[in-house]
Amino acid sequence: MTSGNLRLTVLFSLSALAAAFKIVGGIVYGSKSLLVDALTSIANLVALAATITYFMRSLRPPDEDHHYGHRRLTYGGTILTLMSYSFVAGIAVTELMSPKPYSVSINAPILAVLGFATYSVVITLSRRWGKAFLPYSVFTVSELIESGVVIASSVAGALYSYIIDYAGAWVLAAYIFYELASITCDVIKIVGDTAPPQSTVQEITRTLRDLGLEPVRMRLRMVDDATLHGDVVIRVPPGTRVDEVNDLIAEAERVIKERFNADVTIALEAASRGGREGKEA
Ligand SMILES: [Zn+2]
């Protein structure tokens, strides 16, 4: 086992332990807010496994069945995240639809605190272990915020009225739907072939002009948050030699790849090619 795998196993086991605390607190000690929180912890574990699996796959180089590379496989993790959170959101709503009075044991907030403490360790470790685990810690911070809501509402639920715990449960359920909506928007943006921000288009245009190439048509789309793909048709000053044009195009493709992580194919405008292919463009 590599140290990366070992660390991942430690983080996973601790996250599963935190989820277990919440499940016991929700089922045995009667707190509905803790139960909803437990459901999100389970969804979080599934989402994390899916995110890491598909992230690893997305790093593979292009091959026979993925000519453009595997970048978009990252969204396999995102889609499975949506599925797992949607599933638990359905369970949570069903659980909360019948507001019969119930009682919350004071043990429920104690288990909520244990869950909170365990997640804090997960976040501290994943930050200390460096960049590769950063997405993991970001992911888990929302678990901490949820734990905070649950601790407050289950304590009040145990000491005063179950209604406070019940309200806390609805707050968490609403938060799941908020997360679902925001992740869905992200996915739609990418599968919708959205162009990069106008400022990026302008910078790429400027980069081409600096090299003496005038873009007459540019098509760009986001492959993921940090990767672009597209094609550009350029015009060159009359009289530019073909070998010069070829060098400039190769240079432009390289620079654009380097600066903007854009996989762009550059072609010469048909009119510029004229009938002098042998000597001039
Ligand atoms: Zn492949």
Image (spheres, rainbow, N blue to C red):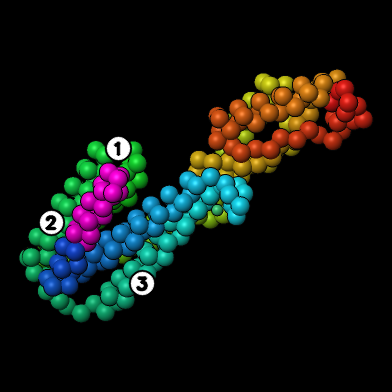
Q: Determine the main secondary structure of the stretch shown in magenta.
A: helix
Asked if 248 appears above or below 226 in the picture, the reply is above
Q: Quadrant of residue 13?
A: bottom left
Query: Residue 47 lies in magenta, yes or no?
Result: no
Q: Could you tell which of marks 2 and 3 lies nearer the N-terminus?
A: 3
Q: Amino acid at mark 3?
A: Gly
Residue 30 position in % (x across, y down):
15, 72
Label 2: element kind: helix
Asked if 199 appears above or below 143 in the picture, the reply is above
Q: Are marks 1 and 3 in contact (CB under 8 Å)?
A: no
Neighbour class for label 2 at 10 Å: few (<14), some, many (≥20)?
A: some
Q: In the picture, which quadrant includes the C terminus?
A: top right
Q: Residue 130: which disc?
A: 1
Residue 269 position in % (x across, y down):
81, 34
Q: Could you tell which of marks 1 and 2 lies nearer the N-terminus?
A: 2
Residue 262 position in % (x across, y down):
59, 37
Q: CA distance from mark 1 to mark 2?
A: 25 Å
Asked if 190 appears above or below 32 in the picture, the reply is above
Q: Residue 90: which disc?
A: 3
Q: Residue 221: which disc?
A: none
State the extent of the magenta-drawn residues as a range: 1-19
Observer-nearest residue: 41 or 202?
A: 41
Residue 6 position in % (x across, y down):
26, 48
* Relative to 66, 138 lies left or right: left
Q: CA distance from mark 1 to mark 3?
A: 35 Å
Q: Residue 114: which disc?
A: 2
Observer-nearest residue: 202 or 229?
A: 229
